[in-house]
Image (cartoon, coloured by chain):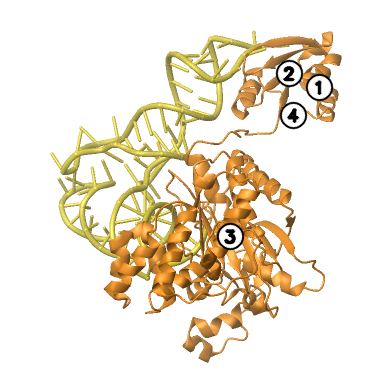
Chain colours: A orange, B yellow
Amino acid sequence: MQKPSIPKGTRDFGPAQVARRQHIFNVIRRTFESFGFAPLETPTLENLSVLTGKYGDEGDQLLFKVLNSGDFAKDVTADDLATGSKALLPKVAEKGLRYDLTVPFARYVAMNRGTLTFPFKRYQMQPVWRADRPQRGRYREFYQCDADVVGTDSLLCEAEIVLMMAQVLGGLGLHDFTIKINHRGVLRNIYQALGGEGRETDLFVAIDKLDKIGRDGVTKELLERGFSEPTIETLFALLTVEGTYEEKLQRLLAGFVTAGVEPDGVRPTTPDVDADSPEPLANYRGLTELAEVRDLLTASGFRQFDRLDFDPTLARGLSYYTGCIFEVKINNVQMGSVSGGGRYDNLTGSFGLPGVSGVGFSFGVDRLYDCLEALDLFTVTGETPTRCLLTHFDVASGRAALPLLAQLRAAGIPSELYPDASKLQKQFKYADAKGIPLVIIMGPEEVATGVVKVKIMQTGVERVLPLGEVVAALTAE
RNA sequence: GUAGAUAUAGCUCAGCUGGUUAGAGCGUCGGAUUGUGAUUCCGAAGGUCGUGGGUUCGAGCCCCAUUAUUUACCCCA
């Protein structure tokens, strides 16, 4: 006999876990739909040509590839084998499991460009797969819940992302969170303020780690990557600006002007956005857009600015982001980000549809689940949906219970009849173990008199009711 | 890919410098209660100690290998 097992990084979800997960999905779905997003589902399998090259070299290695059907080795030559796996791969696998929901979405938009109405808003809640090393909060199969908009540059989308993040977390009872926001334009301006020394991406990767490895760690890493000490000094002066959202914007602005950073223009903004800001703010796209997002949030009634943190060190890995970027962390839990996203100006470009701007974000359901569990915030506990258990002792009383069972179900009370004529004790233990709140006793005595006992498990109180009144009495409660 | 930790009953874990027949709690099953759960009491079943070698008179314990799990790094949700 072999020991049963499941693949690394995958999990079974029992009834209680599914109930809790469904609760999370429901909160997210309700929020997405209330903001006008429509559901989309895409295949588990995508063609590898769609997936490869979209997530960088490391991402490509994390893709699960699916072996071709039939004789998958029929096109393989001795040369291919000698060359190695890279030459072999396209010949044996042409499909792979989806790695995220954004790329399949982009593929869908490009394929259906003729029939979609833009701006197109969709949400998607499906599993994705990554051949990663599993660890805390990291699985090989996990669910993402994405909401994206394509076909508009409006910063209202960015503001609404913040609103949705806050609404979902609040709806789940997770009130102690931080939404970090930054802008790729701000990062670029910082890079320019340093005189454009070294590689831009090296800089972003290093500063993104600031909260993890600290100032000394980042300094060391930048020195290794060829940045000079005065440059690093300037960098930290910009990165460590203190104050409110607004104050940080102003201080960075002053820093950019001092450093002589060339203004990178401005996209159209709403007229009165910068009413209380001096003119130069408008000349840096990143700062301008962050200011506008803040104003749109204020106008939308957003009141949780203490949980919205403009963090110039937030970089995020995925290179396709070009505008605002977001990341959400739950405080007081050791867990990576539970949500993240941003704007990408050319998402569908690689699928032959250039110039379409998209903005979106994603929740990690599995991490939200782990956070809720760590903070003991789950309220859903149901092991079974059953509300009422009918007990019986013999074939005759079991038969006699069936009409009542049907009536209960018709009345919308999820009910079941214990399938075997076991000892009553066993039937009660079953109800107790599953958390079924009501037990109706239906023995020969009850059948003969037409009067049944209804026991409320939690209190132990037992009521005696004529058969005909049971459904009405239970419905009333 | 790099580094560490762990592997003993269905589950969570004890098991001393290597010493006779490997333990507990929970769970399961039976009984006290032949028609009443959760509480109480009594009893029972359940383990080739991850796998393969080695050292030793003797290995759950020491050594080597191997597999699985897990944590951190990288990267990410």
Q: Mark 4 points at which residue?
A: A416
Foreground: disc 2 or disc 3: 3
Label 3, on which residue?
A274
What numbered label is drawn on residue A440? 2
Q: Are marks 1 and 2 on the same chain?
A: yes
Give the secondary structure at mark 2.
strand
Name the residue type under label 1: Ala
Residue at 64%, 75% in the rendered image: A50
Residue visible at 69% across and 21% down? A438
Q: Where is residue A359 in the image (x, y as percent from the top left)?
A: 63, 64
User: From mark 2 to mark 3, how far is it between C-alphas?
Assistant: 68 Å
**CA separation, marks 4 and 2?**
10 Å
Label 1, label 2: how far apart the Cα atoms are: 10 Å
Q: Give the mark, 4 or 3, whose residue is nearer the N terminus.
A: 3
Image position of A113 with respect to A161: above or below? below
Up/down of A300 relative to A290, above or below: above
